[in-house]
Amino acid sequence: MTERKILVTGGSGKLSAEVIKTLLEDFNIQPKQLIVTTRKADKLLALSAKGVDVREADFTSPESLEKAFKGADSLLLVSIDASGPRTQAHLNAVKAAEKVGVSHIVYTSMPSAENSPVIFAHEHDATEKAIKQSTIANATILRNNWYFENVSEYFASILQSGQWLTSAAEGRSAQLSRRDLAYAGASALIKPIEGKVTLPMNGVQSMTHAAMAKVIDKVLGTSINMVHLSDEDYQAQLESFELPTPIVDLCVTMDKHNRGNFSDGTSEAFEKLTGKQPQSFEAWLNENEVNLKKVMQSI
Ligand SMILES: NC(=O)c1ccc[n+]([C@@H]2O[C@H](COP(=O)([O-])OP(=O)(O)OC[C@H]3O[C@@H](n4cnc5c(N)ncnc54)[C@H](OP(=O)(O)O)[C@@H]3O)[C@@H](O)[C@H]2O)c1
């Protein structure tokens, strides 16, 4: 019997790299069982050297995709980072997966994709719908909650200024680490669920922004001041920092989403899929304390 081939897209991205590492190191998937696609194959020479089949694929070039996906049984479609052209790019990838006969697709979506006010939610919603309508027999849609890493990668100003401007009010979000979400992606690939399922991937605690700030203060020794604003005042503040409009719109709609509890939930589905509990925010902060303190000082 031939081994099932597993394909991971976007191999040079942070989530994909962690999924690949998890498959090889934690789940003992043999390199020859793995296909990795990326726009920049020269960045993944170390994987090729291990015997992983690295192929070039760009979701915006549909003609590249069938060749790149050929032979895959299970495919993890990692959502791309370019909002805007994303819907068509994802639909191209779903179509190609369908054409080459992928039998199980895993997709990294977002919480409440169908009714979230986040500016890019419609892109995930359209991708989820295309997957459900496709002839691909099995699909695991992972509605990944927000990464803890966003605190340092997108909202470093909170750590640096000690001011958390927010219109999320008392809304809760069950965030978790990127590494746990990668573990969930790898778990979904190696144990394909039959049929088409949508699973919320949430952290072990659902917290308000103020509760998160208290944990940051405890671990990093900060004294974060919560500045609660209306959507309009939050938008005006962000505009006064001369941030580009798409960033302002993203921040304001994300807080509207958080205020509406669209990212609230429990870690039950994560634990059922992976057989483990996600790392708590406090444990994640402790593990990343050194790097986070560097971010705080890098103004
Ligand atoms: N839940 C959250 O809080 C959160 C936060 C940030 C992002 N995200 C989403 O989750 C995804 C993975 O997160 P990440 O941290 O790994 O982001 P990242 O490091 O910025 O990775 C971006 C990913 O997009 C892929 N990509 C971009 N353009 C592409 C194209 N035209 N065709 C195919 N692949 C393309 C990249 O693949 P190659 O460069 O290898 O081609 C890479 O895997 C992001 O792309 C974004 O959709 C979620």
Image (cartoon, helix red, strand yellow):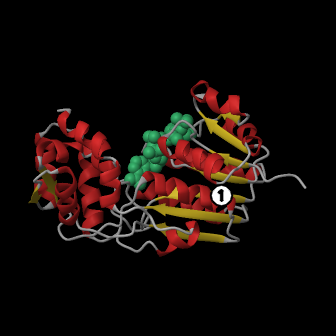
Answer with the quarter of the image where residue 30 lies: top right
Most foreground residue, 147 or 29: 29
Q: Residue at x 59, y 40 (%)?
A: 59
Most foreground residue, 218 or 173: 218
Indicate the amino acid at tag 1: Leu
Percent from the top left, x then y, of residue 215? 22, 60
**Dot 1: few (<14), some (14–19), or many (≥20) neighbours within 10 Å?**
many
Q: Residue at x 82, y 52 (%)?
A: 3
Most foreground residue, 248 or 282: 282
Is residue 201 shown above or below 14? below
Q: Residue at x 52, y 67 (%)?
A: 276
Q: Residue at x 50, y 44 (%)?
A: 80
**Is 25 situated left or right of 251 in this image?**
right
Percent from the top left, x then y, of residue 71? 79, 45
Percent from the top left, x then y, of residue 103? 75, 59
The quadrant in which the C terminus is found is top left
